[in-house]
Image: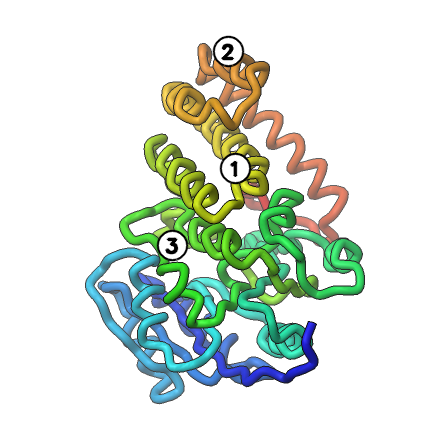
Amino acid sequence: MSNIKPNITISVIIPAYNIEKYIARALRSVLGQTRPADEIIVVDDGSTDGTAEEIKKFGDKVRYLYQANSGPSTARNTGIRAATCKWIAFLDGDDEWLPEYLQRQCKIITQNPELKWLGGNYIRCLCDENLKREVVSAEKMTKRLGNKNYFDDYLIAHLQGPHWCTDTMMVQQWVFDDIGFFPEGITKAEDLDMWLRIAFRYPQFGYSPEPGAIYHLIRPNNLSGSAAPADLYIDFFDRLTRQAEKAGRSEAFEPLATKLLRGWIRSMLFAARGQDIRKMIYNCQNLLSWPYRISIITLTFTPNLTAHCCRLLGKTVRLIGERQQLTRKPSIKKISGKLI
């Protein structure tokens, strides 16, 4: 890597929709950074509650933009086009950064000025239950990185385990002019679509093993947690497969695509979506081995029973995992079934 010190300026893009209870927390976490952001842009995606009033309390510290409700991808794109800085950092309006996040990211950029983008570890939180956990241990990721603070290939790193989220992503602004913007009108994996398209062209990916953000699992208006039709997933794989072929990255993408497909099929087993599973297997069978296809199709013959058994197994695994890893006892309320 070159020793040339890059000129680092950072625009923070925060989409917001009906999150009046949370947006101030997000903005305070940005304003409290040990390395200040150069520009903070909040795109109000047509909120109908008090979100706008909460944002405007921060005065000229925050640049406020309003648009008719169009979804998070359009809001992020609006922010990117309005940004004036070299680097774009993303934060969802109901999440928050840890104080040293930008400082750590800037250190990685300074040490590796050829990087076009980077991400990092984060904490997942069921804060109403006082349950927090690093998505992966910082020690483990430090060992994986060796003596570097970047991965040579995002696709290979992701295949070994997705340990980053949109809240920890930073991208040079010109990359969006080259790659394109977030896909609009899509309510599932629109951020993953973006990261994969960047990875096809620019595989090298900076990474901070220390958590930089808190991702809140209790989220209002959460589209990512809602059921998406099978056609959306099928279109995702079809679209990204074509783009991988065009970029000469099919060999690297196929194992990751298989992992993603199997993960989404697994989630559908929990939801008793047998018909959707069969449709996905039929349309994406080139990504799945025939023993896997047969075993999963067999499970879809009794979707409700399969879902019940999956939930029982999942609950058992979570309880065992919590006993092993959490140091604080949960509250009297029943622990959410959402994985953390």
- Whether residues under marks 3 and 2 lie with C-beta atoms below 8 angstroms apart, the answer is no
Disc 1: which residue: 257
Q: CA distance from mark 3 to mark 2?
A: 36 Å
The crowd level at tag 3 (other Cα within 10 Å; few <14, some 14-19, many 20+) is few
Q: Which mark is residue 298?
A: 2
Is 39 or 194 nearer to us in this picture? 194
**Mark 2 Cα shell of 10 Å, populated few (<14), some (14-19), many (≥20):** some
Residue mark closest to the camera, 2 vs 1: 1
What residue appears at the point 45 percent right and 52 percent down from the top-left corner?
197
Secondary structure under the numbered disc 1 in the rendered image: helix
- Mark 2: which amino acid? Thr
Task: Work out whether residue 36 or residue 334 is closer to the camera in this orientation and state it.
Answer: 36
**In terms of depth relative to the viewer, which is nearer, 334 or 226?**
226
User: 94 above or below 287?
Assistant: below
Q: Position of residue 158 (x, y in %)?
A: 60, 47
Q: In the rendering, which numbered label is found on residue 220?
A: 3
Q: Nearer the viewer, mark 1 or mark 3?
A: 1
Callout 2: helix, strand or loop?
A: helix
Q: Amino acid at mark 1?
A: Ala
Q: Nearer the viewer, residue 251 or 55?
A: 251
- Determine whether, in the image, residue 213 is placed left or right of residue 245: right
Mark carried by residue 315: none
Residue at 33% in and 32% down: 231
Q: Quadrant of the N terminus?
A: bottom right
**Upstream in sequence: badge 3 or badge 2:** 3
At which x and y percent is residue 336?
Answer: 53, 42
Which residue: 51% across, 14% down? 299
State how many labels appear.
Answer: 3
Which residue occupies 20% across, 63% down? Answer: 68
